[in-house]
Image (cartoon, helix red, strand yellow):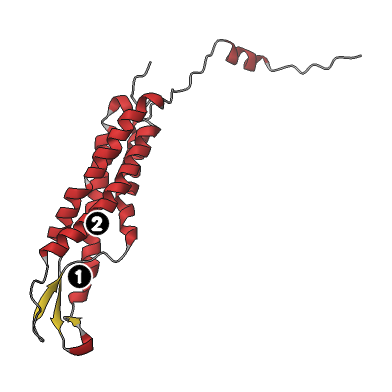
C-alpha cells in the first residue's frame, strides 16, 4: 500500500500557526430586554408625528353640490391629496433618520438585535402616525352642521395609500446600516470583551 500525501505549501502552515482569528460576538440574550424598550419607545414616536402631520397637511376645499353629486373639489384643490402624502413621507423620513441615529448612539447595545428592534418599532410608529394623524385631522376639520348647497367646506386630509408607512423603517435601517459601515469595526465600537 502506498500512502498518498498531499503536502500543504509551507507558507500556509506558517500563516495559520500563530494566528488566532476571533470573530465578533453577537449578543442576543443580553440585548432582548433593551430591544423591547427600543421597540416601545420608537413606536410611541408615532403619536407626535401623526399630530404634526395633522397640522401640516393641507385640507382639500370642496363645494357642496345638491343631489347625487355630493361634494366636488375646487379647481387645483385635488392636488392636496398628493401634498398630504408628501408631508407624511417627509415626516417619516425625518423620524427614520432621528431613530437610526439615536439608536446607533446606544453604544453598549449596537448590533443586529437592536437594529431589528428599531425597524420593528419604526413600522409600528409609522402605522400609529397614520392612524393618529387621520384621527387628529378628522377632528380638526369636522363639519358640525350640515352645509348649504354651494358653500365651500374644508375636508380633512387623507392618506390614500398604506405604502407610506415604509418610509420610516427603511430610513431607520439605512441610517443604522450606514453608521455601521462608517464605523468599520468588528464589534461596532461596542467594546464587549
Quarter of the rendering containing residue 88: bottom left
4, above or below 184, in the image: above
Q: Name the residue under label 2.
A: 131
Residue farthest toward the right in the current orientation of the protein: 1
Residue 119 visible at all: yes
Residue 57 visible at all: no
State which quarter of the image contains the N terminus: top right
Residue 182 locus on image (x, y percent): 34, 34
Residue 110 locus on image (x, y percent): 34, 29
Q: In the figure, is residue 189 to the left or right of 2?
A: left
Question: Residue at 43% of width from left, 26% of height from top?
Answer: 26
State which quarter of the image contains the C terminus: top left
Specify the label residue 80 is tagged with. 1
Question: Residue at 10% of width from left, 78% of height from top?
Answer: 146
- Count neighbours of disc 1 (C-alpha within 10 A) and say few if under 14, some if 14 to 19, many if 20 or more: some
Of labels 2 and 1, the one closer to you: 2
Q: In the figure, is residue 51 to the left or right of 109?
A: left
Residue farthest toward the bottom in the current orientation of the protein: 67
Residue 167 locus on image (x, y percent): 31, 53
Question: Residue at 15% of width from left, 69% of height from top?
Answer: 59
- Count neighbours of disc 2 (C-alpha within 10 A) and say few if under 14, some if 14 to 19, many if 20 or more: some
Amino acid at each position: 500500500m502506498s500512502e498518498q500525501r498531499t503536502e500543504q505549501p509551507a507558507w500556509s502552515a506558517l500563516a495559520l500557526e500563530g494566528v488566532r482569528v476571533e470573530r465578533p460576538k453577537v449578543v442576543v440574550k443580553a440585548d432582548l430586554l433593551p430591544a423591547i424598550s427600543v421597540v416601545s419607545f420608537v413606536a410611541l414616536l408615532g403619536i407626535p408625528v401623526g399630530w404634526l402631520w395633522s397640522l401640516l397637511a393641507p385640507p382639500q376645499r370642496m363645494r357642496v353640490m345638491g343631489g347625487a353629486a355630493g361634494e366636488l373639489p375646487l379647481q387645483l384643490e385635488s392636488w392636496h391629496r398628493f401634498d398630504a402624502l408628501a408631508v407624511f413621507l417627509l415626516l417619516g423620513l425625518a423620524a427614520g433618520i432621528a431613530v437610526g441615529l439615536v439608536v446607533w448612539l446606544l453604544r453598549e447595545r449596537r448590533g443586529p438585535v437592536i437594529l431589528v428592534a428599531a425597524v420593528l418599532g419604526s413600522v409600528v410608529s409609522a402605522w400609529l402616525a397614520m392612524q393618529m394623524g387621520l384621527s387628529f385631522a378628522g377632528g380638526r376639520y369636522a363639519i358640525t352642521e350640515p352645509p348649504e348647497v354651494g358653500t365651500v367646506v374644508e375636508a380633512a386630509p387623507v392618506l390614500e395609500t398604506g405604502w407610506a408607512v415604509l418610509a420610516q423603517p427603511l430610513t431607520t435601517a439605512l441610517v443604522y446600516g450606514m453608521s455601521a459601515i462608517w464605523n468599520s469595526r468588528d464589534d461596532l465600537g461596542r467594546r464587549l470583551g
